[in-house]
Image: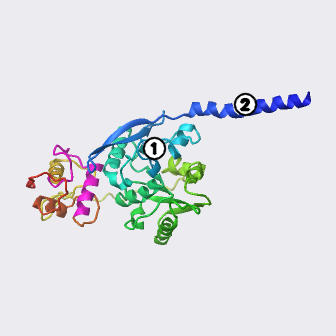
Amino acid sequence: MQRVKRTIALLLAALLLFSVPEAGLAKDAVHFIKHGARDENQDQLITYWLYVPPEAEPGMPLVVYLHGSGERGENALLTSLPQFMKDGVVLCREPILLVPQMPTYFGQWISIENALMKMIDRTVEEYGVDEYRIALVGFSMGGIGVYDLVNLYPERFCRAAAVSGRVNEDVTPEAFAHCELRTFVGTKDANMPPQSALEFAEAMEEAGYTTKTVKFDCTHSRMPYHVFRDAELLEWLWMELAPQPTPKPTVTPKPSKTPKPTATPKPTSTPRPSPTPKNATGYRTLRKGMSGKDVQRFKIAMYWLGYFNDKNVSDEYNSVTVERVKKLQRYNGLEETGVADPALQELVFSGNAVKTEKAPKPSKTPKP
């Protein structure tokens, strides 16, 4: 009889063990919404998935997840971090999660960077995402994409996590000057040997940039199970992307002695403000947040050079304009500041700037 009772008790305990997580999963299950963004370079619509927390508010962070090569086609949500979230293994209440879907026969993530930036810009605008709290994370092919995209857009991401990724030769530590990097490698990873990632992390440390390296004694396929279930990493990725320090309570100052009144000085005549001097070219420096006819004229001129896809541009200098100006500067061998100084405007309006392959034909650059 005692043996029977003990068996029944064990069976009940086992049923309870399996039923409790299922209830939790149903409660914390997440749902991804399908979207699309066209990549002009590939002339194809790129699918992406978006998870928005039920209590989403303006100012929240955004995490962009890049999948590995095995998930090309339509499998972006079937493994790794997105699958853990769908199963309730990983809980995500704070940030928005963006998961792009790489088409079947495409190469690396850098090949569709045009569409990726559109996805990010659209999400930032529609949901009021904090532009200074955007993180990038990727596994395998996605890890390579993390290095490539931060290298191409060095001020776009505040944090990056590369899991089992390889670093291409053109990626520089200086690109991560404004982006905190965490590197995760497997010591038994034969698919993506960790040597280049470890050497790059060492170069970042020598340059004085913020970085952290974590090694796991496992193979390539087991890396997501070790990395994306780590509570500290998840907290770093989306719970405290840019935590605001708690202000210390101020001490009430002791009352000081009332000073003796000083003689009131005689008022001096207020000098008239001198007009802002114009530079030799007559152009003002244009940067993000500005607007006006000169901004619009400059963007139209860039359209005729192939840096904008539509002639009907706005008169606002927004984040998209910044990226297009950086591309213009890169093509012309200039420093990629994203700021259109008078010299750059003179170059564009002179007709001597380098055009892209998408420049309209025939295309005479309009005069300002």
Look at mark 1 in the image and give the residue it sits on. 76
Label 2 Cα crowd, 10 Å radius (few <14 / some 14-19 / many 20+): few
Image x and y of residue 185, in percent: 55, 60
> Is there a contact, CB below 8 Å, between mark 2 and mark 1?
no
Q: Secondary structure at mark 2?
A: helix
Q: Nearer the viewer, residue 211 or 44?
A: 44
- Residue sticking out furthest to the right: 1
Q: Is residue 346 magenta?
A: no
Residue 260 in view of the camera: no
The amino acid marked with disc number 1 is Ala
Label 1 Cα crowd, 10 Å radius (few <14 / some 14-19 / many 20+): many
Image x and y of residue 56, in percent: 45, 36
What is the span of residues highlighted in magenta in the rendered image? Answer: 304-331
Indicate which disc residue 15 carries: 2
- The relative height of residue 296 versus residue 283 in the rendered view (above or below) is above
Q: Nearer the viewer, residue 257 or 300?
A: 300
Q: Nearer the viewer, residue 49 or 261?
A: 49
- The relative height of residue 313 versus residue 267 in the rendered view (above or below) is above
Q: Is residue 316 magenta?
A: yes
Mark 2 vs 1, N-terminal side: 2
